[in-house]
Amino acid sequence: MPKGRYMGEFELYVMAALANLGDDAYGMTVRREIEARAGRHVAIGAVYATLNRLEEKGLVRFTVRDPLPIPGGRARKHARLTPAGHRALEHSTRMLARMLPINSAGGRR
Amino acid sequence: MTPPRLARWLVRLAAAREDRAFVLSDLEEELSRQVTERGDRAARRWYWRQAVTSVVPLLVSQVRTVPCVARVPLLTADDWRQAVRWIGRRPRASTAAVLTLAIALGATGAAAVIVHGLVLRPLPYPDESRVVHLWPVDPNAGPRPSRAAIPVSSLQDVDDWRRAASTTSAISAYVETTYTLTGAGRAQRVVAMRVGPTFDAVLGIVPAAGRAFGEADFRPGSEHVVMLTHRFWQRVFGGDRAAIGQSLRLDDRVFEIVGVLPDLEVPFPSSAHELWVPLIAQPGVFWQNQRGTGWVTAVARVKPDVSREAAEQELSGIARDLRERYPSSNRHRTAIALEPVREAIAGDVRPIVLLIASAIAAVLLVACGNLINLLLAQAEERRRELAVRLALGAAGTRLRGQILCESLLLVSAGATGCALAVPQLIRAFVAVYPDPLPVALLSPGFALAPFVPIVLAAATLVLALPQMAQGRRLDVTATLRGARQTGGRSGRRTREGLVAAQVAFSVALLAAGIAFVRTSAALATTDPGFRAERVLVFSLVPPASRYGAAGARSAYYDRVLTAIESVPGVESAAMAVGVPFVSSGWSFPVVPRGGTEADRVLVRANMTSTRYYETLGIPLMHGRWLSDAEQRSDAHVVLISESAVRLLPDPSRPIGQRIPYSGSTWEIAGVVGDVRDRGLHREGAPAFIMPWSQAGPRPQTVALRTSGDPLLVVPAIRARLAEIDPLVPMADVERLSDVVAETTADERFRAVLVAALAGVAMLLAALGVYSVTAYAVAQRAREYGVRLALGEAPGALAWRVVRSSLKPAIAGAVIGLAAAWYGAAALQQFMFGIEARDPRALALVAFALLTVAVLAAVAPARRAARVDPATALRAE
């Protein structure tokens, strides 16, 4: 990976959330997913800012879906990982696993 | 539920246009989920938190995308070059602007640092606003005693609260005590805090070394453990971790050291304590095991997601249950009031902060007036330059860029000056300040950092916006055609109006400053009823184990007094249970003659050795002193103070009257002068002074009068006392005059700070008068030339200039005087012994300001008188 492609911690969370959510990924579900798993407050603004940044890097693609045909249905901007995004996520997790001490995965908590 | 409007607007504002709708609809969707899951209030709070925390990331991500969308950088190198050139071409105006900025920002910055450091600084505990005192109160019995740092809770109650409460994460209690520490160097008194279980959790601290107290430490018999404060650890053990496990000998008992507290700048509950020991009700000590006895102070930490009101409600409910169960002891504990401990320590700081903040705002406004005036003065030149450049094809954005660059340059120069000045100003403040200050707290710390960019941005905008607006309104052709306006009537009006406003603010501030200085002076010259100068005080507590018997004790005291009086330089020495501002006996209520229960007055009981009155210079008004024999007896004779006389059944002849106290009658032998022992600003308590021998084992304060500086005799006295008994320490050694001065430190603080700010405001107003006059002179040089050519005397001309500059100053002074006159009512709460509304002081203020205004106008006026008619006319 060339220099400058390292990913921030939060970017990694967002990409992992996208991978977990699949088709159902948009701002609020991503936010909820990270908040539930990481157990910390996550601002919607941070999610959007990160998604935009990832899109600029070509790791995420947006599709705008029409409102659901029910009362209160809203337009949503869904996000998916691009193939490059999948590769980057996989690469990062592999690198992380390689870098971390062997037993730390659940040993320290 | 609809989202909170303000929060929604915040998100709207921050989000990029293409994301706006999605972010808002996402938030709304989640909001309705939050409402069903957690209720309206929590959902609203959630929305607000989302909005606030989203602003920064959304804005940052926008900034990152801006350069891609519009590839026009805001400021070009050319803008900077033009700005530097413009500033360089008018050094006087630029210097004046930079000076104004530096003075105003520097003075207000220093004042803010001082107020923050001395008044506002939060306690060094995590989430300190959740640490609260719990006061059991009876709302039906009138207002609760505020900030009563008086122990009012019983340990039994506190234990029950802890068991029942769910809105707090920890509840504990404390009570202060002192021990004699022996074995570590010479014997000394140390202040210790007896703390209940989980006191560390209430404060949210973890030991720096060793451990905190555990449950086992609160069992009777195993409570002889101690935690050291960081300071004590450093002082006695040099910060050695080997101290853990060692022991301290306190009041002849061995305590094992189990832990060290973290290093805290502002220690709670008192700044003096050095040790923590477990607080338990000693078995066999009757009153400590009574639920009815209030002898500890309760503290709690409110849980993070619980409001103070909710906790108050729950605890009050618990208190009511306890009242049902224990109707006799808990009759008056019907509710529990929560009060953040910071308020108990700092008191209600709002009035003083409001006061200083208003003074700061006034100075800033005066400075703003100066800046705007300077800009208006440049307006004419500016208009021509802008017109030429616009005509030559410069884009509007370029002009705005240049103006912005100029403002940024001026503000940065001013800010640099301010940054250089603030530490010096604080140092100067500490130097002129009459009392010792905790200098360590006066660093322009991180807490003020967030305000720096805000203030700088505001200053830049104040400078730039009016000029930018002017550029937009410009009529290029008319300006270039040479329609040279001489400032114009409306321009002059605005400038004069600004000067008037500056003078008005300065007058009002100066009037306040004088009122504070006079209050401080009035306090300093108040007769306290005793003479504090050249008096040394210290406390002496012989251990009960060896001096429990009355005979041993009085023999020891006699030897001590004789030894002290034999020290060269000591004029007289005495002991007392209560010495004003140092120690006090106890008080008992007396209903005055013809009064009801509501009028009762607290009378202070005291016991003093014979030479006490001579030592402190308290006069005998009537009757006689107590004889030596009476002092050593248990005779029922007393001295009373003058103010106690009016409480007697027959105030006309106090001597020989018999009055009841404590189950017997006492004969009045003499009447002594009143002493202001509750602060110099109020009358002292009436006193009731019994023979000294009846003090029993109560702690004694020694007072001695010396011929020179009282601190010089301390080593000799220490040596003599060590000869008598090396295990009784000399504690709390102080000059009585220092103790008295400390009681009025707040008043001096206000006086110095407000007066200093008023001085700055006056300086800035003078600068304003100068710049407006100078500008007017420059504008009207031609008129003056003509006048001089037609034969007007230069002196008369100069006077005309001064007079015209005085007009706005006089108008401002009148407005300022009116403001000071009506604002005095608000200041009166800070005053002592004087009226804030004082015509003479106001007259003085007005005179001072007008004098300054005249002086500021003199230089430009002389320049006007020296105008050379030929040059002035040729220039046209």
Image (cartoon, coloured by chain):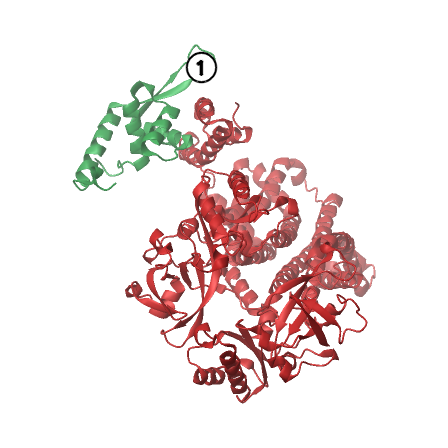
Chain colours: A green, B red
Percent from the top left, x then y, of residue B194? Answer: 44, 59
Residue drawn at (44%, 85%) of the image: B723
Residue B245 in picture, x, y percent from top left: 29, 63
Residue B458 vs residue B626, the one in the foreground: B626
Any part of residue B81 in sight: no
Q: Label 1, secondary structure: give it.
A: loop
Asked if one can make out residue B505 in the rendered structure from this viewpoint, the answer is yes
Residue drawn 22% across and 37% down?
A106
Instruction: Establish if B876 lies above or below A82.
Output: below
Mark 1 Cα shell of 10 Å, populated few (<14), some (14-19), many (≥20): few
Q: Quadrant location of residue B105?
A: bottom right
Instruction: Place residue B334 in its image quadrant.
Output: top right
Task: Identify which residue, B99 or B859, lies in the foreground.
Answer: B99
**Circle 1 marks a residue in which chain?**
A
Residue sitting nearer the eye, B767 or B636? B636
Which residue is at the far top?
A: A69
Q: Is residue B186 above or below residue B393?
A: below
> Up-down: is B206 above or below B650?
above
Which residue is the site of mark 1?
A73
In the figure, residue A12 lies in which quadrant?
A: top left
Q: Is residue B206 left or right of residue B753?
A: left
Counting from the top left corner in percent of width and height, residue B148 is at: 58, 55
Amino acid type for the residue under numbered disc 1: Gly
